Amino acid sequence: IKQLMIEFIYKRRLLYPSLTDRRWVWESDKIRVMEITDSVAAFIMNSFHSLPPDVLSALCVLSCFGASVSISVIETLEAEIQIPLMVPLDTAVAESIVDKREGSFYFIHEKLREAAYDTIRSEQRCLQHFRYGLALGDVAARERDDMLLITAVSQINHGGPQAVIDSEQGVAVASLNLDAGKKAIKLSDFFSAQSFFDHGISYLRKDHWSEHYDLSLELYNSAAKCALMNAEHDSVKLHTEQIMQNAKCFEDKFQAISVTVTLQNWSGNAPAAVELIKSTLSKLEEALPSVVTPAVTKLYLDETKGKLAILPDETLLCFPAMVNPSKILAVELLVRLYVSLHVSGERALMLIIPLKVIQISLTYGMSAHSPSAFAQYGNYLATIEGDFVEGYRYAKLALSLMKKIPSRAQDCNIIFYSNLMRLYVEPMQSSIECYLDVYKASMKTGNPYAVASSFAYSSLCLWSGKNLNAVIVSMKNTMKESKCYKNFVVLTLLLPIFRVALRLKGESDAPAPQQDNITDAFGETFNVGESDGKYALYLHSIMFAKFSEALMFRELHEAREAVEKYFSVEQCESATPTMFFRRFYSGLVTFWVAREM
């Protein structure tokens, strides 16, 4: 085999003598990916049968793990299945079939791996994978070796449900997949995690919801969360529908509701998310006012201010944790409702959300979502009431609470809302860098705020005067992520700003201006003036970008048209990263248009 391979690569000038270096030179990268003709492949297959039986057997085992596998895994497997592997593989190394480097065994070429794998009868392959996976899984469980567990479960899944001998073994394998998926999430590998959870579900038998309810619920909830992060929206719907149909109580449906709300928010269907949350809050006995008047808002605000006035920051930081399950669910839904209302532009109800969360927290204790409410309250005090001192105080309090109530999954939300306040108090060029921290925290935990923070960073880089080349690169990356994760909200908001950046740089391929309507992820179109405040955030963002662009390039007609449409939409005075710019430029453009007309 060695002689044939050398002759083969020599004829293709991948191995040749170098007079300069006075030695033989080979193109190692090209050799690994080169195509091997059928005649050579056939020769390799025939040559494999001439190998000693123990070497061939070890190569077959190695081929089940792919192109390479760590030596420690082979050593562990050898001890468990009582088949000689290390010595035969060393023989294969001497025969130049396998390489041994950096703590792993490697096949010299994929054709060699395929040849070894093809010597296993097709009906035996799934059983072999399954056997090796179970053997390694036992060791991983005993030694609590996370990486070995992932390797073991991957092998088991190559075997598949057809290798399972009975329902009891199927449940055990499903549990192993659940554990492996959790380990993959800790490594921020959500694609592998989703694969483990989906495989775990496949091992469950027909009556699994009645016979193995807890395992089924956890697998479906975990699979739905990962599918959401991976933009597998059809899978999200399938998993959540199963949960809603089979959950025994309302508390067991909550995670499915939460995932559904997030999917609706970030795919552009915020009104549906709002209705789902409102109906769920009613069941939790935390219903919101059906009509929010200034008097109702003042009542909530005065009550919250009164309770907080007698509580110094030190006391708030020492508050006990919330333990009431229904209140924990209510607080999380209220925080998600804030996002939905922010997108749909229902300002009146949005103002009382953080107030209600704070009141619940002061009564029942602090939850992982409570710091977000304090940050939102600080934004309200600063941007709506003009009290920047108190607003900044509560933004910093939120970050301190975050450290006291560790919840990695919520850190990104808290930093995101706290940073809105910092934009108005600290130098913008430095404070916007915090959105990169939000992005990193979100990517590690699978939080949808990853794309939102990327959008905030990209757009603020433009308005704060950063280098245009860097701004455009950042925007392109954000749009690429938005498409990948099917986040239609961010994509809709960023496109008109991206056009401004390209025109400022003088590029001729700037995209055409967007239409004055928005089509959401479900095909419904919302036109300016038709929705009475729904999607006001979208429409304001598009018109803001249009009249800012028109001002920069002195396009009077376009500026007048855009600013008129901007003010024709119901105002959405919520705290956003670009709120200051909107106020300033809308006033400036209005003055310019009025003067010129």
Image (cartoon, grey):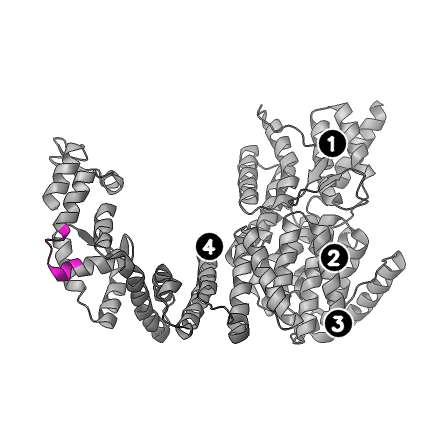
Mark 1 vs 4, N-terminal side: 4
User: What's the residue at 32%, 72% (across, down)?
Assistant: 139
Query: Mark 1 — residue?
Result: 547
Numbered label attached to residue 129: none
Mark 3 vs 1, N-terminal side: 3
Contact check, label 4 and label 3, Cβ < 8 Å: no
Q: Secondary structure at mark 1?
A: helix
Contact check, label 3 and label 2, Cβ < 8 Å: no
Contact check, label 3 and label 1, Cβ < 8 Å: no
Q: Nearer the viewer, residue 572 or 261?
A: 261
Tell me which segment is drawn in magenta. 48-56
Query: Mark 2 — residue?
Result: 275
In the image, what residue type sits under mark 4?
Phe
* Disc number lying in front (4 or 2): 2
Numbered label attached to residue 311: 3
Query: Mark 4 — residue?
Result: 191
Query: Is 98 situated above or below 157?
Result: above
In the image, what residue type sits under mark 2?
Glu
Mark 4 vs 3, N-terminal side: 4
Cα–Cα gap, marks 4 and 3: 45 Å
Cα–Cα gap, marks 3 and 2: 34 Å
Q: Secondary structure at mark 2?
A: helix
Mark 4 vs 2, N-terminal side: 4
Cα–Cα gap, marks 2 and 1: 33 Å
Cα–Cα gap, marks 3 and 1: 45 Å
Q: Residues within 10 Å of mark 1 (few under 14, many from 20)?
A: many
Query: Is 9 situated above or below 175?
Result: above
